[in-house]
Structure formats: C-alpha cells, structure tokens
Image (cartoon, helix red, strand yellow):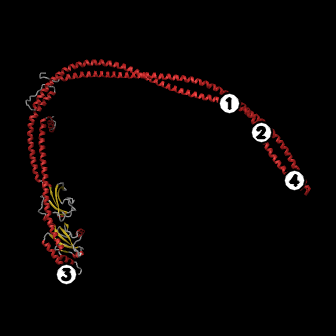
Amino acid sequence: MKNKEPGVRLFGAINRSVGVKLFLIIISSIVVLVSILGMTSYTVSKNIIKKKVASSSLQTIEQASDKLDFLFGVYESQSRQLLVDQELMGQLVAYNGPELATAEKTRISNSIVERLNSMVAADKRLYSVRLVPKSMDKTKLVSSKGASSLNLTENSNLWLDKVIEANGEIVYIPAQKKGLFDLNSEPTMMIGRLLKNLNNPEKEYIVLLEVRDQELSGVLANISLAESSQIMLISSDNDIVHIEDSNLLGSKSTIHISDNGEESKGSLFVKDEHGKDQLVVYKQNELSKWNVVGVAPVSELVKETSSIIQITIIIIVLSALLSVAIGMFVIRMVGRPLQKLSSLMEEGEKGNLSVRTDFRGQDEIGKLGQSFNQMMEQISVLVNKTNDSAQHVLHTAFELSEVSQKSSTMAREVSVAIEEIAQGAMELSIEAEKEMTYAENIGLNMDNVIDSNSKMEESADRVYQISSQGTEYMNELILKTNSTEELTSSMIGKVDRLKESTISIHKILEVLKAMTQQTNILSLNASIEAVRAGAAGKGFMVIADEIRNLSDQSKDSISIVQTITSDIQREVEETVELLLTASPLLTEQIHSVKEAATIFDHVREEMDLFIQHNEVSTTSIKELNQSQLVLSESISNVSAVAEQSSASSEEVASIASEQLNSSEKLVILSDKLADLSESLKESLILFQTSKGE
C-alpha cells in the first residue's frame, strides 16, 4: 500500500467512501451548472451583440452608399448638362469639320478647353475632363488642363467600347492605379457617357469625368465599423474598385457577395485567411451598382462580452467554495454513520453476529441502524436453528444413502435380467424374420415352378400336336415317295427305249450318208459325161451340178442331225445313269420316312404320358404353395409376437435402467447431502451468536 502513487490512493479512497462520492457529486453539479449557465449567457449575449452590431454597421454602410450616390449624382448631372448643351455640341461638330481654318479650329478648341478647365477648377475632386472622339482620332481629342494624352490600350478600348454600347447611358469605370490610360501619377476612376448627336452620329464624342480615388476615401473617411475595420467598393465581377490600399485596386476580393438580384444589402459572417471571424456588411450603390462593403473583426465588436466571462469565473469560484462547505456537512451527517455501519457489516461478514449499532436518530440513518440490529438478531436465531437442522439432515442423509445403495443393487440385477430377456426376444425376432424371408423366397420359387409347369404343359400340347401332324406328313411322304419310285422306274424304261431309238436313227443317218456319197459320185460322173457330150450335154451338166449341190446340202444336214443325235444319245445315257443312281436313294428314303413315322408315333405316345405326369406335378405344387402361405403367415405371427416381446422387454429394461440411474443419482445426492450437512455444520461454527460464545 505504501508503494502506491497518491493518485491511486485517492481514487481508492473515493471508491470506498460514499461521503466522498456525495461531496464530489455536489461540487461537480454546482460547478458544472454554474459553468453552463455562464457560458450560455456569454454565448447568447455575444450573438445578440453580433446581431445588433451587424444591424448598426449595415446602417452605416447605407449612409456611405447614400453619400456616394450623392457624389455620383453630381457627376451624372454635369455629364447630362454637357449632353444637352447645344453650343458645345455645335462647337464639337465644327471642330470636326474638314474645311475649318486653323485659327478658327484653335479658337473653338480653346473655348472648349476653357469650359472643361472651369469644371475641374470648380471641383477639386475632379482630376480631369476629356472629350474623346468616337472614332478614337487622337488629333480630335479635347481635354482639360492636366489630362494625359490618349494612350489606347486593350483595357481602355474595352471600357470605351462599353461606353459607346451604353448609347448615352452613364458607365462607371473602376479606379485604376494610373488611370484608365495608364499615364496618371495617382489612382483615378472615371464616369463616361456618349454625347449623342442624331444629326451627325459620326462626329459624336465620349465625355470622361476622371475622379481622384483619394476623394472617394475622403467621402468614406468618417465611416468606421471598428478600430481595424475596412471600407471598400467591389464590382459585380468581385473586382476591388476602391480600397484604402491602392495596390489592391483591380484585384479579386476574397469576400464573395452573391448577386442574386433579390437583396441589394445584407450582412454575413466569414473567416479570413487566418481563420478569424469577420463581419461583412454590404449595400449596393444605386447609381454605379457597385457594392459598398465594410469588413470588421468580430473579436473587436464583441470585446465588451469579456466582462461576462470574468463574472462567470468569479461565480464559479464562489459556487465551488459553497459546494465544499455543503459537501463537508454531508460527509459529517451521512458519510461517517455509513462508514461506521460498513465496519459493523464487515465484522458480521467475518462471523461476529453480536455487533450492534448505537444510532439514535429518527432519520433514514437511524432507521437503517435499527434495521441492522434487527437483522443481526434474526440471523443469529436463524443460524442456531440451521445448526440443529443440519444435524438432523446429516443423520437422514446417512440412512437415505444406505437405502439408495440397496435399491441401486436390486435395480442393477433386474436390469441385467431384463436385458437378457430382451436380447433373447430380439434374436428370436431376427430368426423369425430370416425364416419369413426364406418362406417368401420358397413361395416365389413355387410360383415360378407353377408358371414353368404351365408353360411346359403348353409346350407338350404343342409337341403332341406337331407329332400328330408329323405322322400324317410322313404317311403322305411315303405315298408320294412310292409314286416317285414308280415314275422313276417308268422313266428308266422310256429312256432305254429312247436310247434304242437314237441308235436306230444313227444307223439310218449312216445309210443316208452313204447314199449322199453315192449321189455325189453319180453327179460327178454325169458332169464328166456332159463334158464329153459337149453342147448336147450342157443340160445334163446343169442337172449334175444341182444334184451335187443337193448332195452336199444333204451331207451337211445329215452331219448336223448326226451330231444332235449323238448329243441326245449321250444325254440319255447320263440320264439313265442318274436314274439308276437315284433309285437306291429313293428306296433308302422310303425306308427312312417309314422309320421317322414310327418315331413320331412313339413321341406322341410319350408326350401324352408327359402331359398326364405334368398335370399331377402341377396339382402337387399348388398344394405345396398353399402350405407355404400358411407357413409364412405363422412365421409372421411369430415374428410379430417376438418383436412385441422385444419392445416390451426394451421398455421394461429402459424403465429399469432409469430406476437404476435414479437410484445411483439418489446415492450421489445422499452423499452430497451428507457433505453439505458437514460443510454447513463447519460454516455455522464460524458464527458467534452472543458475546460469550
């Protein structure tokens, strides 16, 4: 504790003491409340002063704008007088005449200059007066004394064009460091107007009234918003037209005033480049349309409010002293009794129930002390009763533990037996389900066998019918084969006779061939004799030639017929050989057909017996299928009974298990109750219910 820093010790003391907390709360509340009221008063008064100052400053700016309007009005009036002066207009027209003598031109020029000089002499605010020809011809320029020459630049041409475009209306040209023509020794502004001449528009002049910029400062010299305030003129393009520091003329202003055409005056608060608040009030000049702007630091305007801050600080100090006194009183009346009561509570926490308070007051502290004494009395009585009850609970816990252990042992044995019964029922149910599956498979196989027998019976019927048809076909085939054999034998005889006929034809052809040769020889002899006879034998010669030709043709025909007959004879011989070869085959075929007919008869008889046996087998299988259905139903009933038995056994086992768990928990709770009784007894020993104990 000694090593802790003072701040840590102070914080610990605050946390431990209600009186210190009340003391700090009272001080903080009063100081914060007074501070808030003081700062609120300062802020409200500052805002009110700012509004009042802004209003009064705006009135001042309006007065400055009115002064400028008066000044500009004077110069507008002078320019208007020049516009309506017919003598001056005539002199200007004559001065621009091409045939004017030099002396006359000088006289007119001196007259005009004298008048302009009189205007400048009458008003010291005027720097000069110029009459600039519309054609910008420098030789036709007329100006007062002290005016610079016509130095035309881009800037000056721009403003002169604006004056011409105004068509006789006033144009205000902002102040510039060396004047519009950049030849003056001091800043000046100009007021320009076109002197219109409807009869001679080409000889029109521009009148330029050049006003000293310092004279504008003189008009605005008596206007001040604050010690370091500043008055300036700003054009609608935000260019500085007039300011005390002439080096800033023509530059852009850092203050932007919106030209929305609705309000020509107003005030606003802005921050300068250093971040300080500035009051800006402005009023648009009615003639020049320039804004008369006043800028003043807000700190100077509201410096009178600093006294409010000082008064607020004094009140805060006084309220802090008052709150300290109130806090000390609260600590004495509330903190000390609470601290004493806290000490007694700590003694009671350690087990000393004999502590009592001696508060005699009728306030909340006194009632709290009386309630504390009553509470300690009731706690003492409760501790004594609890001690006695703990003894009884401890004894009961031992008895309950013994009974619970016995009950747990019996429940464990019952649970084991029921689990064995449930296991047996479960195995029986599983076996019944397997038998049921086997029975169902047998039933399915029986159905398949019945279907197969039905199909076999149908196939046997078809085989029987086919066998009958085959027998009939074989009988018909035997008859047809016998007929074929007879036809073959007859064909062999006819072929033999045909062979003999071809032999006879061949012999006849041999005879015809010999006759042809003899005829040929006779025709040759006749030809020889006809030659011998000479002319008388020419007729015989022709006949002999014809006979020889016929003999040759007959010989050729006989050769062809002989060839054909030889071919027929050869084919007949081959046919005879084939018929002789086919005859034994037909005999064997007849024998085979007869044997096949016998086999078909045996097949038909066997299929008849097979159909009878198949019908008997189908009847037996159907009876077996009915028995299998009865067996399946019985097995299903056995399985259902086994499942119910298993479910009942499991339910009983679950109940027995829950009873076992309850018994074990009861044993555990009994042990815990005994431990709690011992612990309660040991805890109650710590309490002292009287001073002697």
Q: Nearer the viewer, residue 439 or 31?
A: 439
Question: Which badge, 4 or 3, comes first in the chain's sequence?
Answer: 3
Percent from the top left, x then y, of residue 653? 35, 21
Left or right, residue 606 beside residue 569: left
Whether residues under marks 3 and 1 lie with C-beta atoms below 8 angstroms apart, the answer is no
Mark 2 or 3: in front is: 2
Mark 1 or 4: in front is: 1
Q: Which residue type carries mark 4? A: Ile
Q: Is residue 25 above or below residue 155?
A: above
Q: What secondary structure is marked by label 4? A: helix
Q: What secondary structure is marked by label 3? A: helix
Q: Which residue type carries mark 1? A: Met
What's the distance in space between the residues labelled 4 and 3, CA to CA? 179 Å
What residue is shown at x 15% (from left), y 76% (from top)? Answer: 114
Q: Which residue is mark 4?
A: 543
What's the distance in space between the residues labelled 2 and 4, CA to CA? 42 Å
Q: Nearer the viewer, residue 3 or 677?
A: 677
Q: Which residue is mark 2?
A: 572
What's the distance in space between the residues labelled 1 and 4, CA to CA? 73 Å
What's the distance in space between the residues labelled 1 and 2, CA to CA? 33 Å
The image quarter containing residue 530 is: bottom right
**Residue 487 can be seen, yes or no:** yes
Percent from the top left, x then y, of residue 160? 23, 70
Q: Which residue is mark 1?
A: 474
Percent from the top left, x then y, of residue 391? 20, 19
Question: Which badge, 3 or 1, comes first in the chain's sequence?
Answer: 3
How busy is the neighbourhood of tag 2: few (under 14 within 10 Å), some, or many (20 plus)? Answer: some
Quadrant where the N terminus is found in the figure? top left
Whether residues under marks 2 and 3 lie with C-beta atoms below 8 angstroms apart, the answer is no
Q: What secondary structure is marked by label 2? A: helix
Question: Which badge, 1 or 4, comes first in the chain's sequence?
Answer: 1
Q: Which residue is mark 3?
A: 104
